[in-house]
């Protein structure tokens, strides 16, 4: 009996980086569940495929791009602000493919400004889509990883943790850094529990990448952009890497490809041929480890506390 085909669920796959990840996973042999809020009728478009950074690019068009290229894809809409929508996504994915081997969480709400100029409504939306959405997806996915004998990979689009990231975008950083904390914490859970075939990894661009947010920039600004393929190449490399190498890792696309895949020439990823996009991330990041890293003291577990002891 032939082994079951690997299945990847990409949430936030309608445009830009998420779309590229979905398309390249399909090229690499995965059946891909393409998920985001936006759907459409691809047959209604005057030309196909649509601009990958435009509103015309939806999970419906991305799934069609994959199938027209000979791949296997299935589009399932999901609003990550709704836990019910997330649960329904996993139920539909399991019904269609039976299992999931890889999960990529790419949705993102963005507002870069000072605390004073970030209204609470904007702050709340970013937390709902970014860190709360990720937590909901993780929670909803756990029964499916269990059914898969705790074998799987999760890739999260969130940054390494360092203080400069907070400047000028505190509200946004609170959610994105929270996502990276979830990556670190869940990795520790799995290590504690002996789940040696599960890994969760965070990835962030080392240089700015062409997307809907950068689509209308000047020609000079475009010289500092890379193609989204660098990100999808790094995601694929992370999925291939041993669990011990990537579980709990917070890294950038360029750094992972350089260190693990031995890539030294990144010129093919430049949006403008011959340009050298500026690195926007630090050259080095804090390790976050302390000398007492393995000293937990007395472990606390609220689920095992005596009745009435915990108020949460």
Image (cartoon, rainbow, N blue to C red):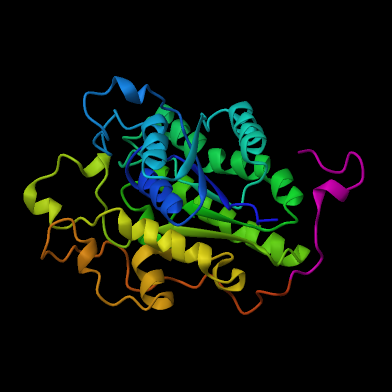
Q: Nearer the viewer, residue 211 or 75?
A: 75
Furthest toward the right, the residue is: 306
Left or right: 195, with 155 as reference point: right
Drawn side of residue 53 relative to residue 221, left or right:
right
> Where is residue 277 shown, x and y percent of the image?
18, 62
Q: Is residue 192 visible from the viewing direction of this image? A: yes
Q: Is residue 263 above or below residue 200?
A: below
Q: Residue 39 location, x and y as percent? A: 41, 25
Horizontal side of residue 284 vs 241, given as left or right: left
Q: Where 13 falls versus 195 (above or below)? A: above
Looking at the rendering, the stretch of residues picked out in magenta corresponds to 296-312
- Secondary structure predominantly adopted by residues drawn in magenta: loop
Q: Quadrant of the C terminus?
A: top right
Which residue is most to the front?
1
Q: Nearer the viewer, residue 132 or 227?
A: 227
Q: Residue at x 40, y 75 (%)?
A: 261
Could you say where residue 17 lies in the image, as x and y percent from the top left?
35, 47
Where is residue 227, by image quadrant?
bottom left
What's the residue at 22%, 23% (across, down)? 46
- Queried whether the magenta region covers residue 309, the answer comes back as yes
Asked if residue 160 can be seen in this view, the reply is no
The quarter holding residue 282 reads: bottom left
In percent of the image, x 66 and y 77: which residue is there?
292
Identify which residue, 233 or 163, lies in the foreground: 233
Does 4 appear above or below 270? above
């Amino acid at each position: 009996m032939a082994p079951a085909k690997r299945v990847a669920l990409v949430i936030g796959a309608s445009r830009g980086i998420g779309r590229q990840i979905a398309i390249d996973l399909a090229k690499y042999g995965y059946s891909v569940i393409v998920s985001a809020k936006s759907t459409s009728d691809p047959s209604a478009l005057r030309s196909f495929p649509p601009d990958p950074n435009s509103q015309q690019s939806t999970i419906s068009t991305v799934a069609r791009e994959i199938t027209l290229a000979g791949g296997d894809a299935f589009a399932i809409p999901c609003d990550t602000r709704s836990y019910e929508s997330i649960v329904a996504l996993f139920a539909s994915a399991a019904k269609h493919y039976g299992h999931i081997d890889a999960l990529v969480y790419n949705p993102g709400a963005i507002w870069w400004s000072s605390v004073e100029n970030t209204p609470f409504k904007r702050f709340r939306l970013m937390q709902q889509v970014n860190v709360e959405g990720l937590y909901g997806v993780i929670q909803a996915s756990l029964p499916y990883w269990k059914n898969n004998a705790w074998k799987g990979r999760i890739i999260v689009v969130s940054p390494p943790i360092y203080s400069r990231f907070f400047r000028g975008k505190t509200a946004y950083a609170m959610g994105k850094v929270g996502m990276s904390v979830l990556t670190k914490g869940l990795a520790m859970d799995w290590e504690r529990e002996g789940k040696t075939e599960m890994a969760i990894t965070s990835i962030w661009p080392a240089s700015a990448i062409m997307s809907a947010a950068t689509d209308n920039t000047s020609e000079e600004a475009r010289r500092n952009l890379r193609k989204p393929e660098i990100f999808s190449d790094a995601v694929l490399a992370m999925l291939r890497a041993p669990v011990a190498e990537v579980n709990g890792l917070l890294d950038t696309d360029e750094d992972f490809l350089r260190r693990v895949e031995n890539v030294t020439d990144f010129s093919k990823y430049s949006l403008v041929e011959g340009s050298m996009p500026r690195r926007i991330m630090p050259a080095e990041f804090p390790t976050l480890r302390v000398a007492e890293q393995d000293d937990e003291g007395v472990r606390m577990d609220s689920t095992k506390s005596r009745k009435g002891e915990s108020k949460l």
